[in-house]
Amino acid sequence: MKPGSLSTFLRTGAIWAFVLLELAFFGIVGDMVSTSNTPFLAPDNLLLTLKQAAPIGIIAMGMTLIMINGNIDLSVGATFALAAVVLLDSMSWPFMAAMGDWAIPLAWFFALAVGALLGAINGLIVWKTGVDAFIVTLGSMLGYRGLVFMYNGEQPTSNLNWTLVDFAEAQFLGLHTPTWFLLAVTLFMWFLSTKTVHGRNAYAIGNNREAAVNAGIRVGPHMLINFVIIGFLAALSAVVFYSESGSVNPNDGQLYELWVITAVVLGGTKLAGGSGNVISTLGGVIAIQVLRKGLGHMGAATETVNLVIGLILIAVLFLDRQLNVKGREALKT
Amino acid sequence: MTAPALRLENIVKTFPGVRALDGVSFEVMPGEVHALMGENGAGKSTLMKVLGGIYQPDEGRIVVEEKPVTMRTPMEAKAQGIVFIHQELSLATELTVAENIYLGELPRRRFGLVDWQTLYARTDAILKKLKVGFDARTIVGSLSIANQQMVEIARALTVDAKAVIFDEPTASLTDAEKSVLFDVIADLRGSGVGIIYISHRMEEIFKITDRISVLRDGSYRGTVNTAETDEDAITQLMIGRSLDLSRNTVHHELGDVALEVRGLSCGKLFQDVSFSVRKGEVLGFYGLVGAGRTEIAEALFGLRNPSGGEILLNGEVVRISSPHDAIAKGISLVPEDRKGQGLVLGMNCRDNMTLPQVDDLKAGPFVAEGAEVAIFDQYRDRLDIRTPGWRQTVGNLSGGNQQKIVIGKWLSMHPEVLIVDEPTRGIDVGSKSEIHKLIRELAAQGYAVIVISSEMPEVLHVSDRIVAMYSGRIMRTFTSEEVTEDNLIQAISGIRADRDAPVAEPA
């Protein structure tokens, strides 16, 4: 075997093995403990799990690219909420209301544009000031959340459009609309990160920024593009989710950034940048959702779920570290 | 006869598939400076890790003053009196000298409070022995690299050291700082400590060591008395043949002036620098660390904004605002710090080689992987890059092959001017001569090449003309016929020996 291929396999394949392990566990042990009559592995339940994984998953695809690039974005939860507010509120504007169902694509456009704009603001600040993305997006996380509250105070913003609900709840080939969005975004981001120049350069910048600059790569524009992408995806996530629910609380999307980062890290992307891939991130997203769903199936409370996910995250990273340290030593002869 | 301070007996260490150390034995006497030499990959660092308690030997014994010892951690090694002065300093720069020296072992009073008085008194006593110009309360970050190294040495002196190991200690020191370091080493040796000195630099080895032991491919090749050998014999031991560093006498046919610099200045870094390189010519830059050579290269590559003067490419004045700009105009830089500035270590060979042109190679929105592999194959063959395949991660290659990847990266861009900063730093002797040959070949093919080097034999070996720099200024430009070691050293030391001699220009 070529050097490093074992750890490469573990990094890309292990998360899927973990998902299978989870399914087996909840399918057997879960069903024994559960008071519910439907088995955990019932197709409908699994399809629902995928659908519920979509909001975090769509954002996680953008976060993977951001983290490969060596940055991080903590403002995605707030962007998600603000895009949702714009989506639902814009449909009640008089000129939009007059358009009937034609207002829907326009409302989607407004929400997505707001997401891309918020991302662009983050990207421009990171590029032009040179301040660390962690700090910049920590600031914008608070700032964007402030905008959400300024929009409608503590009140929820609601607008239920049945055409939208029908669209969001539709199933095609068994998969729900949000799942299709998740798969489409994953595919798109896979192409972007592995097949395009932008993706290649993102890896190079995250791995060794100075060498990338010396190779003539303009680092700033690449970072800006990535922030625009993740802002857009945070808004897309909101669009998909709130088309169905029709009501957004100003606190919605809080802690999303942490769930997203957890999924990306579980998928093997390094916080330091330079490595990672979106397919493994998809594995991380599904692993978390199966765990949440499965523990719920067994009757565990939300607190327990969070505790278990936290422990698993640390255990996985510890394992990864053990494997890598060994691999690196063997190479250093 | 006195017992050796440290003796290694038949040390064997294997890793999966590799016998990294194959029965290495040598000994260091008290009061001896013992050089350990070998190419990269010869096993020096593995041996040091065995001595430092990081690796456990599979076979063999380590004996300190006739007492066999086992060391499972770096702390245990230190407790046995084996102390390291590492190439890369590991100091807490925000803390004081005293805190750094006693880090982890701060003297305490009741309730775990730090006994500052004792700490400073003990530290000052050690610093006095080293005759340094700073005291225990100085913040380490405010010291020069050389003085920070003194702090490391002071740290070594807090234990009853039997053997002190210096790993490439002069890598980032100026000549003045080096001589201070050598004085300290002489003092240590006078006090009966055994010293292992690891360095690639022959002149240092011959200046300060008593005996030289050589490793090759993980096995021990012998120990010789420094006084009874010469560089050639040592090189023979290290690589099994000798390295050709004769003076360059062959000049290729010169084309037009590719790059001309007129009165270029950049603040205090360099002033009023003028020179020109023709196609088919290798222009060497020689000078001390800090003379401004690298900074000139960075200005030409768009990494620094010059404060005055002009740059002409093929006779036209150009402004170079970024590396992107420089590359587009045909200037390439093989940087000094290969791993930090030249390569993306986590990426594979092919991706590193095509990094600057991947944007030009795309097919629609996608990277053209086939074209990339073709480019990689072409330059792998041309530069004789030894790698299992393009998928290999660059970080796993040897220094020489890594440098060839960087050079191949720029050659595949067909630059007008190729600047090579310290082309063979940290590269083993065998690859060194290959890279020297390559530089000469590039000139023969009509490239204008600028070589910056701190090694005089290297500059003399590859250059057609040599620019001598001192303190940000060009002192003199020599042709390879008129240059001698003496007049070159005078020039880079700031002595204008023959002030009236006309500055040499290409014919």
Image (cartoon, rainbow, N blue to C red):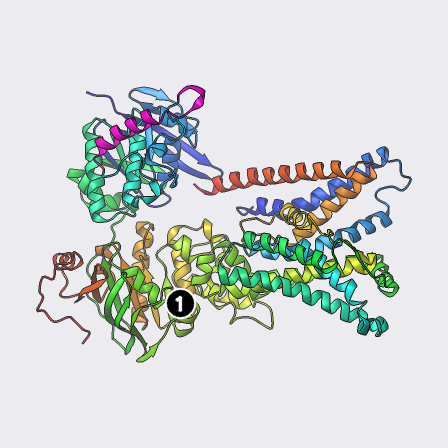
Q: Position of residue A160 (x, y in %)?
A: 85, 61
Q: Is residue B117 magenta?
A: yes
Q: Residue sitting at 72 percent across and 65 percent down?
A: A111
Quick check: B368 above or below B339? below
Q: Is residue B214 visible?
A: no
Q: How crowded is the residue under tag 1: few (<14 C-alpha within 10 Å), some, or many (20+)?
A: some
Quick check: B434 above or below A272? below
Q: Is residue B361 left or right of residue B310?
A: right
Q: Which residue is mark 1?
A: B411
Q: For residue A294, which quarter of the picture?
A: top right
Q: Is residue A292 left or right of residue B318?
A: right
Q: Is residue A122 visible?
A: yes
Q: Which residues are magenta?
A: B109-132
Q: Amino acid at mark 1?
A: Leu
Q: Is residue A211 magenta?
A: no
Between A326 and A111, the one nearer to me in the picture:
A111
